[in-house]
Amino acid sequence: QVRLVESGGDLVQTGGSLRLSCAASGVIFSFNDMGWYRQVPGRQRELVAGITRGGVTNYADSVKGRFTIARDNAKNTVYLQMDSLKPEDTAVYYCNADVSLRNGVRLGNYWGQGTQVTVSA
C-alpha cells in the first residue's frame, strides 16, 4: 500500500516559518515527481511546489522566494520549507507523489491526508 505521511503543519504568526515533511513508503514502489499542494474551502487544490526525482523544482508565483522544496531520495521524503508566511498561505497542505512499481509500471498520483497550516495576522 502506498502511504504518504505528512507532518509539520501548525499555527504560526505572519512572518513566521514552518517546515513540512512528507515521507512516502511502500517497499514495492518507486516515487517519481513529488510535490506540495494546498486547498482552502471553496477553492480548487493548487500546486504550491513540485520537484522531480532529479531535483528540478517549480513553484507557484505566490510562494517564489519564500518557500523551498527539497527531497531526499534515499528516504523517499519531500520537504517544504516555508518562510515569511502570510495569512493567504493558510490552507490544508497535501503531499503528492507520482508512483510506479519497481518494475516500471506507473500506478498514478497518490495523496497524503493533509496537514493544516494556519497563519494568523
Image (cartoon, rainbow, N blue to C red):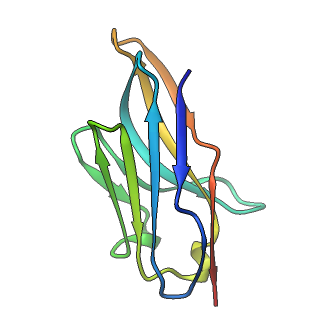
Quarter of the figure that contains the C terminus: bottom right
The residue that appears at 43% across and 83% down in the rendered structure is 84
Residue at 48%, 83% in the rendered image: 16
Q: Is residue 84 above or below residue 59?
A: below
Q: Which one is in front, 78 or 52?
A: 78
Q: Residue at x 54, y 82 (%)?
A: 86
Q: Work out whether 21 lies above or below 30.
A: below
Residue 60, image x, y percentages:
43, 63
Q: Quadrant of the N terminus?
A: top right
- Comparing 53 with 71, the one in front is 71
Residue 82 placement (x, y as % from top left): 43, 71
Name the residue furthest right. Answer: 42
Q: How many marks?
A: 0
- Name the residue at the bottom extreme: 121
> Which residue is nearer to you in this view: 50 or 93?
93
Compared across the picture, whether 23 is left or right of 44 comes to left
Residue 120 lies, in percent from the top left, at: 65, 85
Tell which of 99 and 26 is nearer to you: 26
Q: Position of residue 57 (x, y in %)?
A: 29, 53
Residue at 46 percent across and 24 percent down: it is 26
